[in-house]
Image: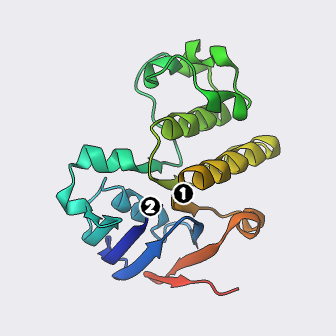
Amino acid sequence: MTILRLQEFQVFALKPFNLEVNNEIVFLTGASGAGKSLLLRAIADLIMHNGEAYLDEKKCSDINPVQWRKWVGFLPAESAWWRDKVGDHFSAEDHPYLALLNLPADCLQWDVARCSTGEKQRLAIVRLLAQQPKVLLLDEPTASLDPVSVELVESLVIDYANKFNVPVIWVSHDASQIKRLSQREFKIKENEICEVMA
């Protein structure tokens, strides 16, 4: 089981805080612009931050950034695609997660330009999980999806988290989703992170 621990962690105007996430799904909420996405990017070591992040006892500052980002998988709200073909973004020719998200096996042959927003998002989730990260940082992963796809993504993330015992930090504005999946919820308000008590 991987433990993600943040110690006196701070990014931009956010006040320093401490947080430990075990094998659980923790939701991060707050108004638009509160800093939720920035916080996930900082935990993934994609932007400057103060304080320290740990995976078990390994310090982010002691780990090669490329390795850290393999362990700490970040899914942005809008996925990035830098080559023409979908399959050029995957290391394998096939992946079992495709079928679990209602994507045909031949989708790896598609041009990225022909993919809908929802298809790109589901493909980005498959691409992330294919790397077998030890932590999942999900920035509104289902915001652009239809109800059926939302259910598929939620099931896949839960199954992945349980199978590999990984911590999940999930940003969402969907109150029903938070109620369904959340084991803990933290809210950013006035530059502070506070746990929402049930």
Q: How many marks?
A: 2
Identify the secondary structure beneath mark 1. Answer: loop
Front-most of residues 141 and 62: 62
The x, y position of residue 161, in whole percent, is: 59, 54
Q: Which residue is mark 1?
A: 165
> Which residue occupies 33% across, 82% down?
16
The x, y position of residue 189, in whole percent, is: 51, 81
Question: Amino acid under label 2?
Answer: Thr
Q: Which residue is mark 2?
A: 2
Identify the secondary structure beneath mark 2. Answer: loop
Q: Quick check: 70 above or below 80?
A: below
Specify whether 166 is left or right of 198.
Answer: left
Label disc, if present, on residue 140 of the rendered structure:
none
* Separation of marks 1 and 2 at Cα, in angstroms: 7 Å
Specify whether 131 is left or right of 60.
Answer: right
N-term-proximal mark, 1 vs 2: 2
